[in-house]
Image (cartoon, grey):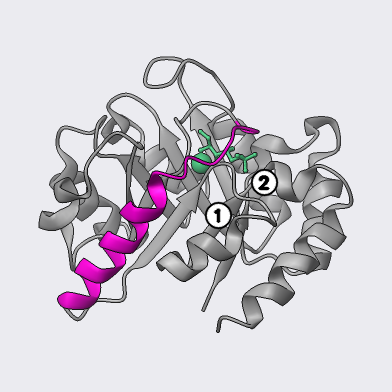
Amino acid sequence: MIILSPSILASDFTILGEQMRQAEAGGNDYFHFDVMDGMFVPNISFGIPVLISVRKFTHKTLDVHLMVEAPERYIDKFIDAGADIITVHQEACKPLRDTVDHIHERGKRAGIAIKPGTDIDVLDEYFGLADMFLIMTVEPGFGGQKYMDVCTGKIRNLRERLAGKGLDTDIQVDGGITRENVETVLSAGANVIVMGSSIFKGNITDNTKYFSELFKKYD
Ligand code: DX5
Ligand code: ZN
């Protein structure tokens, strides 16, 4: 199944709830929640209080992307606030194995993200452990950036490596995904598609409907 996860970072926070409803009317599967700490990435977004409100507002899966230094410090707080999936960066989380185990002990799904410059080799030891691998297709920190074509090969290599081990682990892509390049990442093997600008700029329901209809062709 191809999953559509709109990134609310791109929404208008003065009408966040209304815009989430508009995405739901178009048929999204998840909401992507980009947490930025100004340390791991040169930007600050939002955190626990916003997640608590978003959790009360939607039944959709909340896919929390922690672009945070030492994210292991916050796993319980984000789970208590309503996260269904927590994705941490391999580059930021020293006790990565323990952190993945802890997310599982709390009954949630664990994702591991890598930046464009990080090789997929670092993910090998988490095959069969992580529920999702996030291949960043832009440098993390900001929405509205351009897709980095060099990442297409990473997605394909990771999908081939997983298949070689008999695994169909989710591969999430995140950053600069548009109507023009989404089929490139789908063909390369991504199956969880994050989009911020492509959903929240323009008619949100139409944008979401466009992608959810397209994804049905790949199921
Ligand atoms: C960037 C974030 C992405 C970003 C996606 O650091 O992780 O989720 O918000 O936004 P677009 O789709 O506009 O690139
Ligand atoms: Zn993200």
Three-letter amino acid code at disc 1?
Leu
Q: Which quadrant of the structure image shows residue 90? A: top left
Q: Residue at x 67, y 42 (%)?
A: 8
Of 76 and 207, nearer the camera is: 207
User: Which residue is the site of mark 1?
Assistant: 62
Q: Position of residue 197 (x, y in %)?
A: 71, 41
Marks 1 and 2, the one that precedes in the sequence: 2
Up the image or down, 166 lies above or below 199; here it is below
* Quadrant of the rendered image holding ligand 1: top right
Q: Is residue 131 visible?
A: no
Of 188 and 20, nearer the camera is: 188
Three-letter amino acid code at disc 2?
Val
Q: Which quadrant of the structure image shows residue 13? A: top right
User: Which residue is the site of mark 2?
Assistant: 54
Report the quarter where the C terminus lies.
Answer: bottom right
Residue 56 highlighted magenta (yes or no): no
Q: Secondary structure at mark 2?
A: helix
Q: Secondary structure at mark 1?
A: strand
Q: How many marks?
A: 2
Mark 2: give few (<14), some (14-19) or many (20+) Cα within 10 Å: many
Q: Position of residue 186 (x, y in %)?
A: 51, 67
Residue 182 shown left or right of residue 13 in the figure: left
Say if mark 1 contacts mark 2, CB within 8 Å.
Answer: yes
Residue 45 shown left or right of residue 120 in the figure: right
Q: Nearer the viewer, mark 1 or mark 2?
A: 1
Q: Which residues are magenta?
A: 143-164
Q: Position of residue 192 (x, y in %)?
A: 50, 63
